[in-house]
Amino acid sequence: MISNLKVALLLVSRSVTRGSKGTLLLTILIIALAFVNMTVMAGLVDGVVATIDRQVIDNHVGNIVAEPLAGEQHIRSVAALEVLIESTPGIVATSPRYILGATLVFDPREDDETERQMSWPIRSIDPAKEQRVTHLHEWMVAGEYLEPLDHDQIMLGRELSGGYGASIEMQSLQGADVGDEISVFYANGVERIYTVKGIFATRFPLVDIGAFVTQREMEGVLGLHDRASEILIRTEEPGREAQFIRSLEQRGADTVVLRPWTDYLSFFRGFTDSLIRIVGIISSIGLLVAGITIFIVIYINAFTRKRQIGILKAIGMSEGIITTSYVLQALFFGIVGVGLGASFMYFAVGPYFRSNPLDFPIGDVSLVVTGRDLLVNGAGLVVMSIIGGFLPSYRVVKADIIEAIWG
């Protein structure tokens, strides 16, 4: 077997060194480009998923959300529950919130003709606690973040205010800015007039459509204390939410329903699943193109050397050795092409995307290339190279010796 392999390798080296250098380089380049295309597409989808995940955790709901039990409108004894949660190893902070439906009215000229209305839930935050759980305070594009004692101030997302690059301006307050007054009619019948203190833009629609007042203000509106509609929980690292939820339940957090952040992905889950399927289709096409390319190259190579193959068979060389030589040649194309593509990804494409992330509506998206993507794409191309080398060579080698020699 070793002797046969040595002979096959000798045939490969002669074919590569004496064959057309242009064909050799073009074949390797096609495989390298197919590898880069597959890896970039997979990396972009992984980057989109990573950006969505980061936005949901950092700016929307934290890692875990505590909600009232079924049939309950609010969580009770919030202060004691926060102590229990924050004393759990691995949990960094908590931030209680109230949520109340409201109609926001903005009349810039106070003449009723320019009045703009929008119905949307208003959330309350304790600004100090919120900063330990979400990063909203880092995304202010105008005005200032809320202070704990603010009672007549409101903070708007840009998609709700309708300015600062809002993408759905027609469904917003269409221009409410810092210093403007907004009338708020809460669902419980309470009316308030707020001054816009700040506007934030995380570039994530689920967050930028929001409106926030302080916890102190909302407790005055609701006439409640030590309650909450939800409690956001921040953990040291994502990925262990199920473990933390079990730990909290074992420690007595049975007065709330605990949900991981993945339950709040909304339609983005279906969006990313669709992208993954599209990438799978594109990768399959890339594999097919690479396989067909190698098939054609090996077939033409073997067919033009049909007489030589006949002579080799006539002097006693087995069909297996000849076929193996062409399979090894195709394997050489695949390995070198994948290596070239991987080097291009590592030294050129990856650093470029890290320095120049793509500006998506959901935030900055960079290329996320995992070892799994590299391994799967590389292995797929190598397998297709072997198949593309075996099929044509086997067909040519099986020809009758006399027919091969005399054509």
Image: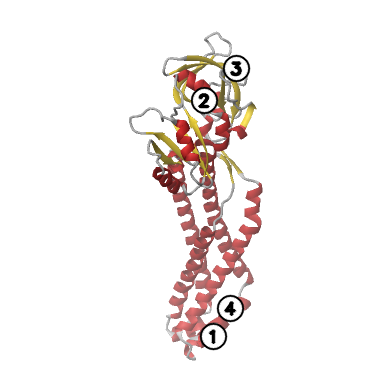
- Discs 1, 4 touching: Cβ within 8 Å: no
Q: Answer left or right for 14 relative to 397.
A: right
Q: Residue furthest top?
A: 111
Instruction: Report, in whole angstroms, how far the alpha carbon at label 1 lies from the one at label 2.
Output: 80 Å
- Discs 3, 2 touching: Cβ within 8 Å: no
Q: How is the image coloured?
A: secondary structure
Q: Please state which amino acid type lies under the numbered disc 4.
A: Ser
Q: Which residue is mark 1?
A: 7
Q: Secondary structure at mark 3?
A: loop
Q: Please state which amino acid type lies under the numbered disc 2.
A: Gln
- How packed mark 1 is, by other alpha carbons closer than 10 Å (few <14, some 14-19, many 20 or more), is some
Instruction: Report, in whole angstroms, how far the alpha carbon at label 4 lies from the one at label 2.
Output: 77 Å
In this view, the residue in front, 242 or 366, is 242
Q: Which residue is mark 2?
A: 215
Q: Which mark is residue 15?
A: 4
Q: Which residue is mark 3?
A: 180
In this view, the residue in front, 59 or 223, is 223
Please report whichever mark, 1 or 4, sits nearer to the chain's N-terminal start. 1
Give the residue drawn at x 50%, y 26%. 124
- How packed mark 3 is, by other alpha carbons closer than 10 Å (few <14, some 14-19, many 20 or more), is some
Please report whichever mark, 4 or 3, sits nearer to the chain's N-terminal start. 4
Please report whichever mark, 3 or 1, sits nearer to the chain's N-terminal start. 1
Q: Please state which amino acid type lies under the numbered disc 3.
A: Asp
Q: Which one is in front in this view, the residue at disc 4 or the one at disc 3? A: 3
Please report whichever mark, 3 or 2, sits nearer to the chain's N-terminal start. 3
Residue 122 visible in this rendered orientation of the protein: yes
